[in-house]
Amino acid sequence: MTHNKHPIVYAASQVHPKNWYPIPLIFCRPWGKLPENVPCHPKLADFANCMKKKGRGMSIFISIIDGDYHELAEDAKAACKQLSTYIDYKQCEGVAEIVVAPNMSEGFRGIVQTMGLGNLKPNIIVMRYPEIWRRENLTEIPATFVGIINDCIVANKAVVIVKGLDEWPNEYQRQYGTIDLYWIVRDGGLMLLLSQLLLTKASFEGCKIQVFCIAEEDSDAEGLKADVKKFLYDLRMQAEVIVISMKSWEGQGEQQESIEAFSAAQGRIASYLGEMKERAERDKTPLMADGKPVVVNEQQVEKFLYTTLKLNSTILKYSRMAAVVFVSLPPPPVNHPAFFYMEYMDLLVENVPRLLIVRGYRRDVVTLFT
């Protein structure tokens, strides 16, 4: 009997890109009110069905009940049954899980570490963008939202955040126009793969893909365009490639709505920071945000806001009529209060009706043979 010197170890992170397919963990937190008998946003199941690769893939729908497990175990069972029935009614292949935890952040952290088994662990966290947080004055949302994104980054899970979920089409509502990708960060090809999966669905099959890349210098633009075109050609993906150079980015006038949203965000951040400083002086403590000391670099905050303004303005300029827009998810910057990050995100999504904000992987999910 011969011994193999190099035993093959299969781990969840070592699935070959050709065999990789999305296993979405659908986070049912509505970030607002739903009717009594609706345990999950109705369009989340429609969206989950859009992420199937050749019909493969099981979605896991999860919800968290805040409280004590011993007191709420029966409630959790009943809620799980209700969610499961709802998923069947929406004709979505998926399972329901309800977790009881002291609060949502702890519940999510437990789920992201333990849910699934081996190669069947969920690899994409899908949730709705909390569009209503300011309108309904839900002040706890920024810290929770940022905590969830940071947990996904630590666990190396991909993230898809859906903005404009209320308008997501069902399989009978045909979409026309383009699916526009703003490919800013290398993401293992997840954005490309998701856009291709959308094209296989009846509602999006009439759309064309456009890939927007941002070049740092004018001189890089042609080279970048050729590289991206070759990459897409090798992947047998048909898409138009549009390169926007930073210089032309700087030169173009911003869209009026973007400037108004930028000024409003600037004002809210300034007053929030003023309150933080006042509190610190009054209590003789360092600057505190989200329960911990922070060092706020105001120039960096301004730079973040300005970059987001440019990106939002560019999306409005080129993609106002797009069926769906994809954009990279900016990771929450260290030392920026969660409220600031929420402001950056609100500015990014401003006036874009249907947007998927995507964080991919450090490893590839598409190959030249996908």
Image (cartoon, rainbow, N blue to C red):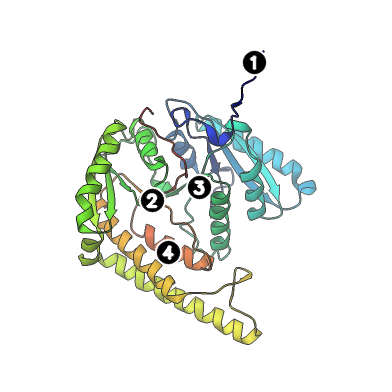
- Residue 253 is at least partly visible in this image: no
Q: Earlier in the sequence, mark 2 or mark 1?
A: 1
| Location of residue 251 in the rendering, given as x and y in whole percent from the top left corner | 20, 66
Specify few, some or many for label 3: CA neighbours under 10 Å numbering under 14, 14-19, or 20 or more.
Answer: many
| Location of residue 364 in the rendering, given as x and y in whole percent from the top left corner | 44, 38
Q: Nearer the viewer, mark 3 or mark 2?
A: 2
Location of mark 1 (residue): 2
Q: Which mark is residue 127?
A: 3
Q: Earlier in the sequence, mark 3 or mark 2?
A: 3
Q: Secondary structure at mark 1?
A: loop
Reply above or below: 33 against 239. below
Specify few, some or many for label 1: CA neighbours under 10 Å numbering under 14, 14-19, or 20 or more.
Answer: few
Location of mark 4 (residue): 344
Location of mark 2 (residue): 185
Identify the amino acid type marked 2: Val
Q: CA distance from mark 4 to mark 1?
A: 59 Å
Reply above or below: 175 against 105. above
Identify the amino acid type marked 4: Tyr
Q: Nearer the viewer, mark 2 or mark 4?
A: 2
